[in-house]
Amino acid sequence: MNRTSLLQHRQGGSIVLFVIILIAVIGGGWYALSNLRRSSEIEGQQFAREVIERVAVQHDGRYLHSIVPADRRIAFPPATEQGFIDGFTKLGAPDRNFALEGNLTFESYFFSPHGTFKTILTYPDRHATIFVNIAKPSGYWVLRDLAVTWERPPE
């Protein structure tokens, strides 16, 4: 082998090695981001369930206040928070076995998860359909909105 062909052979091997490393890095990044997305989906459902449990079942006003972000305070002031807690407290304790429906969506497929979840709680004299809108804008979950509709069960 002459010197030129040996040099070309080494460059070809370097290119192949570079492509293999690049594919491995891209594959590893995709795998890590996919795991991040799956864990965010699980965390989001757990957070939505916790919001409903702590607010509608345990009537925890401090918890409700702590999960509303500062940019939502105008739309969700402390008086509104207390109104939700008082309304749930007057109804008593609902059945704790509730199903949660909903899912998260993501910005750019992986980042900034947000979503709306719905459940129906059964109280002794009525049903409450609760919608919670949650988001994780910067590392922690927050409550963006809470809505409740009341209806009497069929007699």
Image (tube, rainbow, N blue to C red):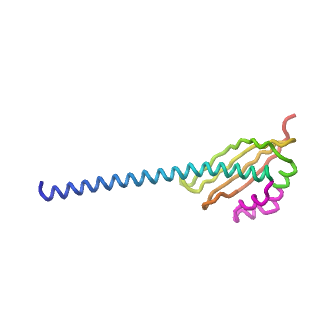
What residue span does the magenta drawing correspond to? Answer: 59-83
| Residue 22 percent location from the top left of the image | 37, 55
| Residue 65 percent location from the top left of the image | 75, 61
Q: Residue at x 71, y 41 (%)?
A: 99
Left or right for 46, reference 150? left
Figure quadrant of residue 17: bottom left
Q: How many marks?
A: 0
Q: Is residue 62 magenta?
A: yes
The N terminus: image quadrant: bottom left
Q: Residue at x 63, y 46 (%)?
A: 103
Q: Is residue 70 magenta?
A: yes
Figure quadrant of residue 10: bottom left
| Residue 131 percent location from the top left of the image | 73, 49
Q: Would you place residue 64 above or below residue 96 in this image?
A: below
The residue sitting at the left extreme is 2
Magenta stretch mostly in which secondary structure?
helix
